[in-house]
């Protein structure tokens, strides 16, 4: 049986593939691919590692390789090396080169219409990195060496598409500006320190969240090498003052800082600089070093207190946006300093700040004349006095959101209606001391487009009628859980608010099909209507909404209220909260 091919005859593909995977050199792989067509195809399946030069025409070369080697898990791209087509000699080489040449000509004709753009293709770009993300779906390790034309856009494509990526080595990617590291549980300080050292000069934005092995050591490297950093977002229980101080000292251009770090405190941990005569306290160093800081978000920083916020306010006078969320040791004194020192503040958000009292917002009203947005959630010590001060001092206010601030009543909201004539967005959720007279004042003085009074159980027809008559631009309305609201209010809304697009009527026990028919008669732009747990609304009312509103996209209602005819006509817009009611 001389010359008989026993291997190809007897061995299945799986076994030959396993043998090829055990070859330990590129030369051996290349030699095995010359045996026959079958082995060439199996060799392509067996390759798990590719090393590619990044000069020449790497973008199109990567696309060419991705079509042939589908099981690659590791890719090394080095711009110091030139692209060379590592295929076999003879006819097969000629055929592959012809394919590559054809592919290249088509690519250049499509993507490189002029000489200037063609010259850009001589090194790896974001297009090539996107081709890596698209073509190598099983990629676990990627190394980019001296790929200076790769930017944040290319890195983002990797993060979105390479779900199995475990190792990313970026050496001298000089245009990297935005790095977002979220839930990278295996990422350690060694990786981020190396990245900051080699690519830090261009980095402008860094986000680190849920990376349990990233500590202050990484932030020290960022502070040392990322002098252009403008935005920093940190969500970690393993980062303390030491890392924050390093950022403050090393990143003078920082404009946006978001902290959700429970171990950041006001205690002295390190000297701010050689010229400092004493240790600075926590956030005080940021106030001293980051003069251009404009946006500050503090979330769940339980050990931060008034002294830290006071230092920020006095040092960062260009602050425009401040959010304090769940920082229970920050009180009235800290926010007073913001009102006194930050005249450019345009947005203030206070969430779950039980220790901040009325006098803090009094100072904000006096000093922050340009305030346009105020958010208050579960601030139990704030009442009408605070809202009156804001209304009288911040007349440019456009957005006011208050939720579960039970000391806020009609007096404060009346002051808003009388003074804030630019207000377009008002939300008063579960503020049960707000009555009809407050909405009457708002309707007379504010050109509202968005209104949410969900859970304000003292509001009835009179308040909503005033809004309907005074706010013809109203587009979104939430009146859920208003037990005293009836059909009269809906009729007035239909007459006065023809631009209404979204309305929430859930848990309104007094409204009926009659009011609903008046509402939809003139509100032809209505797109969304929520009306669950409204006992006065029947299947006829649901059918009226569906048939009368040509732009309707969503109707939320109990399933048993929908007739079979309505289901046939509008099944795509119907949503059900509870199927068994």
Image (cartoon, rainbow, N blue to C red):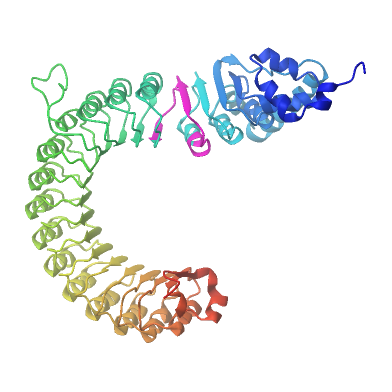
Q: Position of residue 377 (x, y in %)?
A: 21, 56
Quadrant location of the C terminus in the rendered image: bottom left
Residue nearest the observer in this picture, 136 or 294: 136
Quarter of the image for residue 10 reads top right
| Magenta segment includes 12 | no
Q: Residue at x 8, y 48 (%)?
A: 332
For residue 460, above or below residue 25: below
Q: Position of residue 191 (x, y in %)?
A: 39, 23
For residue 355, above or below residue 480: above
Residue extending furthest toward the bottom: 514
For residue 141, above or below residue 316: above
Which segment is the magenta one? 157-181
Q: In the shown orientation, is residue 216 left or right of residue 284?
A: right
| Magenta segment includes 167 | yes
Q: Position of residue 538 (x, y in %)?
A: 42, 83
Q: Visible in this render: residue 474?
A: no
Quadrant location of the N terminus in the rendered image: top right
Q: In the shown orientation, is residue 222 left or right of residue 146?
A: left
Residue nearest the observer in this picture, 37 or 486: 37
Q: Visible in this render: residue 482?
A: yes
Q: Residue at x 31, y 24 (%)?
A: 218
């Amino acid at each position: 049986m001389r010359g008989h091919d026993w291997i190809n005859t007897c061995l299945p593909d799986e076994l030959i593939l396993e043998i090829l995977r055990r070859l330990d050199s590129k030369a051996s792989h290349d030699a095995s691919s010359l045996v026959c067509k079958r082995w060439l195809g199996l060799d392509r399946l067996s390759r798990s590692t590719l090393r590619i030069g990044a000069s020449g025409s790497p973008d199109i070369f990567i696309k060419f390789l991705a079509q042939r080697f589908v099981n690659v898990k590791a890719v090394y791209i080095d711009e110091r090396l030139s692209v060379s087509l590592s295929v076999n000699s003879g006819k097969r080489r000629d055929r592959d080169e012809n394919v590559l040449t054809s592919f290249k000509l088509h690519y250049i004709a499509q993507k490189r219409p002029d000489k200037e753009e063609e010259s850009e293709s001589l090194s790896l770009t974001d297009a090539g990195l996107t081709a890596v993300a698209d073509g190598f779906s099983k990629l676990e390790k990627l190394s980019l060496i001296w790929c200076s034309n790769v930017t944040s856009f290319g890195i983002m494509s990797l993060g979105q598409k390479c779900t199995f990526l475990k190792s990313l080595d970026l050496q001298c990617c000089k245009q990297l500006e935005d790095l977002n590291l979220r839930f990278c549980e295996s990422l350690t300080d060694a990786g981020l320190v190396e990245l900051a050292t080699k690519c830090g000069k261009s980095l402008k934005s860094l986000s680190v969240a849920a990376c349990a092995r990233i500590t202050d050591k990484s932030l020290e490297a960022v502070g040392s090498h990322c002098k252009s950093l403008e935005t920093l977002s940190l969500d970690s229980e393993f980062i303390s003052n030491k890392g924050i101080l390093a950022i403050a000292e090393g990143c003078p251009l920082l404009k946006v800082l978001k902290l959700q770090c429970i171990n950041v405190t006001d205690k002295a941990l390190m000297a701010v600089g050689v010229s400092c005569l004493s240790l600075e306290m926590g956030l005080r160093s940021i106030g001293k070093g980051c003069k251009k800081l404009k946006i500050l978000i503090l979330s769940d920083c339980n050990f931060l207190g008034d002294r830290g916020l006071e230092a920020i306010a006095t040092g960062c006078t260009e602050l425009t946006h401040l959010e304090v969320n769940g920082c229970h040791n920050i009180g009235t004194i800290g926010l007073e300093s913001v009102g006194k020192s930050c005249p450019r503040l345009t947005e203030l958000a206070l969430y779950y700040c039980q220790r901040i009292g009325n006098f803090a917002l009094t100072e904000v009203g006096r000093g922050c004349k340009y305030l346009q947005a105020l958010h208050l959630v579960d601030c139990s010590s704030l009442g009408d006095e605070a809202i009156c001060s804001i209304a009288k001092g911040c007349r440019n206010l456009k957005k006011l959101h208050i939720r579960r601030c039970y000391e806020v009543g009609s007096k404060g909201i009346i002051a808003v209606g009388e003074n804030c004539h630019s207000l377009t967005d008002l939300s008063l959720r579960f503020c049960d001391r707000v009555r009809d007279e407050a909405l009457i004042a708002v309707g007379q003085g504010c050109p509202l487009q968005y209104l949410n009074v969900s859970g304000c159980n003292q509001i009835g027809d009179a308040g909503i009628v005033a809004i309907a008559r005074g706010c013809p631009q109203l587009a979104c309305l939430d009146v859920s859980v208003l037990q005293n609201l009836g059909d009269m209010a809906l009729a007035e809304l239909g007459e006065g608010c023809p631009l209404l697009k979204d309305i929430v009527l859930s848990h309104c026990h007094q409204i009926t099909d009659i009011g609903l028919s008046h509402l939809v008669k003139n509100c032809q732009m209505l797109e969304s209507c929520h009306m669950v747990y409204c006992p006065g609304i029947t299947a006829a009312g649901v059918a009226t909404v569906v048939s009368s509103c040509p732009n309707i996209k969503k109707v939320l209602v109990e399933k048993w209220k929908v007739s079979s005819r309505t289901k046939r006509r509008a099944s795509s817009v119907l949503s059900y909260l509870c199927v068994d009611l």
